Image: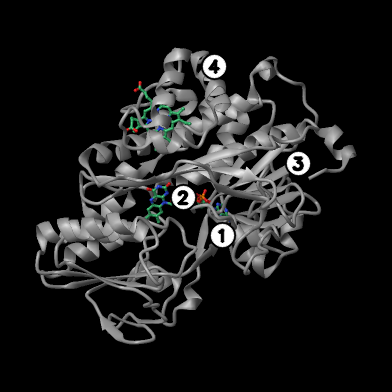
Amino acid sequence: MKACTGIMLALLFALPASAEVDKRARSLASTCAACHGTDGKSVGGTAVLAGMDKAEFIKQMTSFKSGQRKVTVMHQHARGYTDEEIEKMATYFSTQSRGE
Amino acid sequence: MTFDRREFLKIAASGTLLTAFPSIAFSAPELMKKKGPRVVIVGAGFGGATCAKYLRMWSDKKIEVILVERSPTFISCPMSNTVIGGSRSMQDITHQYKALGKKYGVKLIQGEVVAIDTAKQTVNLAKGYLKYDRLVVAPGIDLMYDQIEGLSQKIADEQIPHAWKAGPQTALLRKQLEAMADGGVYLLSIPKAPYRCPPGPYERACQVAFYLKHNKPKSKVLILDANPDITSKKGLFLSAWNTLYPGMIEYRPNAMVTKVDAATRSAKTEFEDVKADVLNVVPPMRAGKAADLAGAVNVDKRWCAVDFLSYESKVQKNVHIIGDAVAAGLPKSGHMATAQAKVTAAAIIELMNGRQPDPDPVVNNTCYSMVSDKEAMHVANVFRFNVEKQAMVSAEGGGVSEKYSEEEGSFAKYWANNIWSDVLR
Ligand SMILES: Cc1cc2nc3c(=O)[nH]c(=O)nc-3n(C[C@H](O)[C@H](O)[C@H](O)COP(=O)(O)OP(=O)(O)OC[C@H]3O[C@@H](n4cnc5c(N)ncnc54)[C@H](O)[C@@H]3O)c2cc1C
């Protein structure tokens, strides 16, 4: 939806330094938060994804997709994401600190 | 008007003044003068609170976020059925809003939104108004009491609870079950879809049966479902009912309750009159009233159509609708409300910077259902934006549990703890 440019200009705010983050990756990763916590910092029970090794993450997600690793729910999620998206999430999570 | 200030606040707080004298709204003061880019959010449930937090996080606190909520605490519908079943307490599902302010600088106002002017871009509370650049309306649902003869908000609050908004009615329903004699009948009436939380009613039947089995084993659970069949996880629920609660749960499809009588404790469908000891009638539902105040209810006079890239209303500019109020082929769940909230937060930041939102949003949903105090099962799906259909559609994957299990009972608990934290902390 194209909004009125005059109003838009009035709303512009300075871009923060963290505008460098891959926002697409950040959004994709945020879809895991209900079970794995904000930015992958699980508050208990489920795996902490924050700080996870990139290759290990991709390996896990691939084994969920293929059904090689037998699990309760992750295969049903992993299959909904493309390999490129999994790669993006892997990068994002691997650069998150493991939490407070 | 000659009310003195104290009198004014008292009446205004009761919520009647503004409807009776709408002009008052405009003589009320501006609350929190707007200085920079600002988003006002109506409703701090799963959708609204998450959107507030992520707007602050992802804009590096550059956008001022004001979150207006009528309730002093967050009471979670997810897991509220286990309060009715007796394995959790009201306290377990009640959470505080504090961290949203402390950690993220969200400005929380406790109060009722009573008017919205989308032309002037203002939101009215009883005590004054707020200006916004963009508005997020996340009001959840309202119950349509007028669809069931003999039912009203008052009767629901005192005698025939729906307990479809977690809170005092959840506690009331639990008390009624505790007071019921062994051999009694608990009646659950389910409205036609779409309604909040498709598997919720069947989970509730499990939780009530769980309580009765261990405390009043001669009792019955009678389900009158307005739908032609169990609307979610059918096979799994049937197996739970037959295995865990054999002979206890009776299910009647195509049974829409049209009338109740609180005095005789009876419910009427097209085909029969049913008496019960505890009546749990869930009326049909619609988008919460705040969506009407924003002029955004445009589907069946009940729901709000949105652009799925930004959740901006199809009929109101700069007004975003999220959560149960949205008309979509998406489940009305807390999990989904948080997913929509994040897409919206990201989109608003882009739009307020004069850029376009992500053209390919992906969201997912999982609804766990607790079938006893320890065992659960789930349904999970990923949804992607489909350009041709201009809709969110199921992606590859998705599915339900093979069987309910204690393992998944633990995962359901982890889900609840993590989503509560994602929304509020
Ligand atoms: C029994 C039951 C079990 C459920 N179980 C699950 C589950 O296991 N998993 C799951 O994902 N979902 C579950 N749900 C569904 C989930 O609760 C809803 O889908 C979710 O709450 C929707 O979020 P929302 O933000 O749209 O609305 P809500 O969470 O209801 O938030 C709306 C908020 O807006 C406030 N508000 C409304 N109007 C105004 C106003 N005018 N002024 C100020 N404040 C206002 C309300 O007080 C409320 O706090 C369950 C629901 C029920 C009833």
- Circle 1 marks a residue in which chain? B
Between marks 4 and 1, how big is the CA–CA gap?
40 Å
Task: Estimate the x, y position of residue B101 in percent, counting from the top left.
Answer: 54, 31
Task: Estimate the x, y position of residue B81 in percent, counting from the top left.
Answer: 30, 53
Q: Which residue is mark 2?
A: B333
The amino acid on which the numbered mark 2 sits, given as a three-letter code, is Ser
Asked if labels 4 and 1 share a chain, the reply is no
Q: Which residue is mark 4?
A: A91
- Circle 2 marks a residue in which chain? B
The amino acid on which the numbered mark 1 sits, given as a three-letter code, is Gly
Q: Which residue is mark 1?
A: B288
Between marks 4 and 2, how big is the CA–CA gap?
29 Å
**Residue B35 visible to the viewer:** no
Element at label 3: loop
Task: Estimate the x, y position of residue B318 in percent, counting from the top left.
Answer: 75, 47
Task: Estimate the x, y position of residue B5 in percent, counting from the top left.
Answer: 64, 54
Between marks 3 and 4, how big is the CA–CA gap?
34 Å
Q: Which residue is mark 3?
A: B133
Element at label 4: helix
N-terminal-most mark, 1 or 2: 1
Which residue shows up at 39% across the image and 21% down it?
A48
Between marks 3 and 2, how big is the CA–CA gap?
28 Å
